[in-house]
Image (cartoon, rainbow, N blue to C red):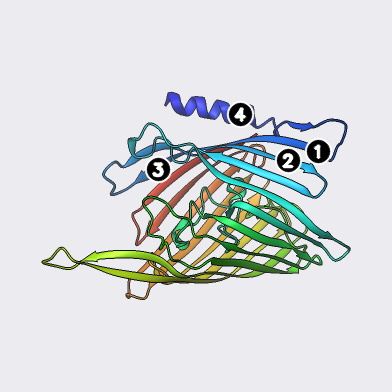
């Protein structure tokens, strides 16, 4: 209980701050740096788990962004993910994002940029959403089956930008992340990943991270998107032959597609958000389809949410789950709390999350 008191106190203090400190370097206002901190403590109750109750730091991030000169920006982010989860007292502090972004062109039609480094793969609205702007307490990870990645990141370069206020794109080439516990094939081809979005209502979103939940503010919007993730000879696995020491070497391609959407509007006193996506996967992790639809309804600072997700494997194994939630926004995304109850084919869970963003 004492841990919760400390966390709640931290959130209340953080609620009075809307952004981290920003420094201008020298007399040139085009050169600046900004520091941010994101913390998301979670409590998870799993009905049939070995340890039913688990309290941990889902994310603990230090974020540094800035601009070297007009048209040259950078972003670096560390994360201490899942510290304390499953009774493990510490977690590694990893550099999760690190890249430089160069503007190639700016006109009345739009802007075009080239980004390089350790990047969040531009596959879908869901996996490109900022962790501080989620509709639910956490990502809909059950429907994302990306392989050869580090928390959905990979080393590479990408072009991104917009053509008018209606159309935006991100497309890139990546190495395929190679970790000690991973199954990446050393002979894999370059990974090609991209996502396009057409705004039928509202303006195209061109920020580094998509806003999954916009607090019922601003003009109505409706964006439809499509994404692809492809890498030939992506993974290499070995299977031991029964009764011998021989192993069978298997190379598997990676192919994934998504059609998704984001939308929101104000209906009288209620701010509505509706997001969803349908995915098809063919890789070493999953072979089949997944889908998710999520709804949020906000009145003032209180929001109700509901979600349906399905994982339909080609092996005729299907998993359907339902989630309802309640969020309260003390200071928008800078200080919020939420609780979710999930039931269905997966284990029944209760997830409680707090967030503060400096």
Q: Which residue is mark 4?
A: 12
Measuring from the top left, give residue 318's x and y in whole percent: 36, 70
Q: Which residue is mark 1?
A: 31
The residue located at (53%, 66%) in the rendering is 190
Disc 2 is placed on an element classified as strand
SS category of the residue bearing label 3 = strand
Q: Report the quarter where the C terminus lies.
A: top right
Q: Position of residue 99 (x, y in %)?
A: 64, 48
Labels 4 & 3 near each other (Cβ < 8 A): no
Residue holding disc 3: 44
Looking at the rendered image, the disc whose residue lies closer to the viewer, 2 or 4, is 2
Depth check: 319 or 77 in front? 77
Q: Nearer the viewer, residue 306 or 314?
A: 314
Q: 10 Å neighbourhood of mark 4: few (<14), some, or many (≥20)?
A: some
> In percent of the image, x 50 and y 25: which residue is there?
6
- In this rendering, which labeled residue sits more in front, label 4 or label 1? 1
Q: Give the mark nearest the N terminus, 4 or 3.
A: 4
Q: Label 1 near label 2: C-beta < 8 Å?
A: yes
Residue at mark 2 = 66
Q: Nearer the viewer, residue 277 or 186?
A: 186
């Amino acid at each position: 209980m004492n841990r919760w008191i400390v966390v709640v106190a931290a959130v209340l203090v953080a609620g009075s701050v809307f952004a981290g400190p920003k420094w201008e370097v020298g007399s040139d206002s085009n050169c600046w740096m900004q520091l941010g901190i994101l913390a998301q403590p979670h409590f998870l109750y799993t009905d049939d788990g070995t340890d039913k109750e688990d309290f941990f730091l889902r994310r603990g991030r230090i974020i540094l962004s800035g601009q070297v000169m007009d048209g040259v920006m950078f972003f670096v982010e560390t994360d201490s993910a899942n510290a304390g989860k499953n009774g493990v007292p510490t977690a590694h502090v990893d550099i999760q994002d690190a890249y430089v972004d160069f503007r190639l062109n700016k006109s009345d039609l739009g802007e075009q940029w080239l980004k390089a480094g350790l990047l969040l793969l531009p596959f879908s609205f869901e996996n490109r959403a900022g962790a501080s702007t989620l509709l639910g307490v956490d990502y809909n990870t059950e429907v994302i089956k990306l392989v050869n990645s580090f928390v959905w990141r990979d080393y590479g370069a990408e072009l991104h930008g917009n053509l008018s206020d209606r159309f935006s794109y991100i497309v890139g080439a990546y190495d395929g992340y190679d970790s000690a516990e991973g199954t990446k094939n050393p002979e894999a081809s370059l990974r090609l990943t991209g996502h396009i979005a057409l705004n039928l209502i509202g303006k195209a979103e061109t920020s580094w991270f998509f806003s999954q939940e916009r607090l019922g503010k601003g003009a109505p919007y409706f964006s439809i998107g499509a994404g692809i993730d492809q890498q030939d000879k992506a993974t290499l696995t070995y299977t031991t032959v029964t009764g011998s020491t021989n192993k069978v070497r298997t190379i598997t391609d990676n192919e994934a597609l998504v059609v998704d959407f984001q939308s929101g509007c104000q209906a009288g006193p209620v701010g509505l958000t509706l997001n969803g996506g349908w995915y098809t996967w063919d890789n070493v992790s999953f072979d089949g389809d997944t889908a998710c639809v999520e709804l949020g309804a906000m009145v003032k600072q209180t929001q109700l949410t509901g979600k349906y997700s399905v994982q339909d494997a080609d092996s005729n194994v299907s998993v359907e789950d339902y989630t309802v939630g309640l969020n309260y926004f003390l200071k928008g995304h800078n200080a919020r709390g939420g609780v979710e109850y999930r039931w269905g084919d997966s284990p029944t869970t209760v997830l409680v999350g707090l967030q503060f963003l400096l």
